[in-house]
Amino acid sequence: MATETVAKPRTSLRVGVQKFGTFLSGMIMPNIGAFIAWGLITALFIKVGWIPVAELGGFGTNAEGVPNVGIVGPMVKYLLPILIAYTGGRMVYDVRGGVVGAIATMGVIAGTDSPMFIGAMIMGPLGAWTMKQLDRLWDGKIRPGFEMLVNNFSAGIWGAALALGGFYGLSWVVQRFTEGAGAVVGFLVNNGLLPLTSIFIEPAKVLFLNNAINHGVLTPLGIQQSLEQGKSILFLLEANPGPGMGILLAYMFFGRGAAKASAPGAAIIHFFGGIHEIYFPYVLMKPILIIAAIGGGMTGIATLAITNSGLVAPAAPGSIIAVIAQTSRDSYIGVILAVVLATTVSFLIASLILRTSKNKGEDDLSAATSRMEAMKGKKSSVSSALVGDRGGRSDVAVLTRPVQNIVFACDAGMGSSAMGASVLRNKIKAAGFPDVKVTNSAIANLSDTYDVVITHQDLTERAQPKTSSAVHYSVDNFMNSPKYDEIVELVKTSNTEGPAAAHPTGAAEAAAAATHGAHAAEPAAAVVEGKGVLLAESVVLNGTARDRDSAIDEAGKLLLDRGAVDVSYVHAMHEREESVSTYMGSFLAIPHGTNAAKDHIMHSAVSIVRYPEGIDWGGKQVKFVVGVAGINNEHLHILSSIAKIFTNKAQVAELEQATTVEEVLELFGKVNA
C-alpha cells in the first residue's frame, strides 16, 4: 500500500537560521549537566543561597583576610566556556579541533572579567575550522616519522596565536556586544516591554528557530545576569511550559478525534518531560492557536517581571521539574505563578478558538506531525507518542514512488554494510527486481537521495538526520535479518502499485545519480599491483585466539603481513568494534577499520581465520573471522561471495568441514579474476 511521504523542505532563510540554531544548541546541550551543577551550587552556597558557605560561594574573606574565591565564580568563568568551546571545536574538527578551540577560548576568557559564553561559541568552532584548513596545507607532505611532531606543534603554535588574538581583540568585541545586548534587555525590562518578546519567541518555537534565540543569546545573557544578581528572568522567556500546556489542555476538553485522545499523553511529556515540540503539531493543525501561545507567554513573562522572579541557571529541558530545581530561593512564588497563569491564559484563548471554530481539531494529527517534522528537517523523537511508531520502523515516511535506490550505511561503509547490501541485493534479484539499486556507504557520506536506508540499530540515529525523507530500517544482524523480507515486500508493492510505478526509467536514473559517493554494488577487479584480495597465505583454518580482541589482532596481522595495511589500521579495527559490533550472524564476524582509518590501507585485502571450537563475540558465537581492508570497490567481490556462502547453511557446513585452504578458496570462487 502506497502512502504519503514528507517532501524535503526547500532551502530558505528559516532553514539557514534553523541550522545555525542547531549548531549553537549542539555546543550547549551536551554541557547542560555542567550548567545544572553550577546552578545547584550557586543556589545553595552563595551569600543569598539556601546554605551560604563563604568558601564555596566565593564571598567574604578567610582567616588570613584573603577574599574567598569559591567554586561558583571559577566554574562560570573557566569551566563552562571551555566546555562549550571544546564541544564546538570537536563538532567542526573532532578532538583536535576541540583542543585548539579550547586553547583559543582561554585568551578571550582572560581578556575580560565577564563570562565569555559568546566568545567560546565563536572561538571554539573558529579555532577548529582554521586548524582544519591549516592541516590541509601540509596533508600528505610530512615525512614518515614526523607526523606526531608536526601535528602537536602546529596545534600548539596555532592555538597560542589564536589565544593571543582573543585576548587582545575578540574579548573586547564580545564584551561590547554583551553590554549592548544587556542594555537592550534592560531597556525592555525597565519599560515593561519584555513580555512583547513572546510575539517573536512563541512562533519561533513552532518553527524550530528557538535554539538560535535561546542558546545563542538568552542563555549567555542570563548567565551574566545571574552572576551579578543571583537570578535571571531570561532563562524562562522560552522555557516556560505554561503556553504549550494550556493549548494541550484545551484540546483535552474541546478537541475531537485523535487530537483529543492523544492530548493527555502529550501534556505529560510536555510538562514533566520538558519536550515542548510535542505540542507543535496541535498548533500546526490550527495555526491561529499561536495567539494562545503568545498570550500565555506574555502573561508568564509579565508575572516574572512584576514579582522580580527568575532562575539561577538554564532549565533544560523545559520541564516543570527542571524549572523548579533552578528557581532562585526568593522566586518560587513568582515562578510557579508565572507557569500557572501562562497555562491559564493560553488555555482560555485556545478553548475559545476551538469552541467557536467549525473545525475543532479533528484534522489528521499524523499529517500535522509530518509537517512539523518537515520543518524540523528530521524525525521528531516524540512523534510516536502522537501517531504511533508507524509500523515499528524508525522511518518518517513510506514512499509513493517505486523503491529504486537502497543504501546500507555503517561507520566505514566498507565491511558490514557491503555484506548486508550483497545479501539484500540477492534477495531482491530473486524476487524479480534486478534494476533496484542496492549500494553501501559510510554514514558520513550519506545524502538525502535514497528511498530506503538500512543501518545497524546502534547507528540509526546518526543516519536519520542525513536522510530524513527516506524510509529507515534498523537491524541487529546484517546477514539474515527478518527486516529484509519486509524490504523485499516494500520493493514489490511500490513497484507494482501507484502512479510513480509508471516511470521506472526516471526512477532508475535518479537512483544511479544517487550512488555518487557510495560504494557501487558491482563486483570490481580484485587485483592491485599484482596482489589479489584473498590469497592462500591469508587463510588460517585453526585460529589460536580465544577471545574477540585477540581474534581481531590475528585477522589484522594477516593483513599487516601482506603489506595491505599499517598498524594504525589494526588499532582502528578495535575502535570500530567498540563502537558497533561487526558480528554478522551465521557464526561470522567481519572486523574492519573506521571510516577515518581508510588512509592507512595500502591495498585491498581480506583475511579469513576459522575457529572450529568458536569464540565469544560480545555474547555471540563466532567460528569465522574475516578481516577486511578495502580501497574503493576492490574488496566487494569477495564480500559478495562471503555473503552468498553465509546465507547458505549447506555451504557454511562445508566451510566448517574443510581440511585445506584450497577447499576454502575454491568455495569462495575465483575471487581474483
Image: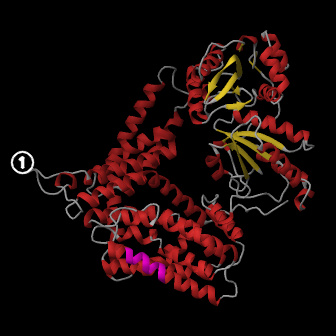
Which secondary structure type mostly characterizes the magenta part of the structure?
helix
Residue at 60% x, 23% y: name it: 548
Residue 251 vertical placement versus 81 (above, below): below
Q: Is residue 95 left or right of residue 170?
A: right
Position of residue 53 measured from the top left corner of the image (x, y, whole percent): 19, 55
Q: Residues within 10 Å of mark 1 (few under 14, many from 20)?
A: few
On-image quarter of the N terminus: bottom right
Residue at position x 57%, y 85% from top?
A: 351
Closest to the observer: 331 or 20?
A: 331
Q: Which residue is mark 1?
A: 64
In-front residue for pair 63/635: 63
Give the residue type at disc 1: Glu
> Is residue 639 visible from the viewing direction of this image?
yes
Q: Which residues are magenta?
A: 336-344
Q: Is 89 within the magenta?
A: no
Residue 520 in view here: no
Q: In the displayed image of the protein, which residue is found farthest to the left?
A: 64
Instruction: Find residue 593 and report its image quarter.
Output: top right
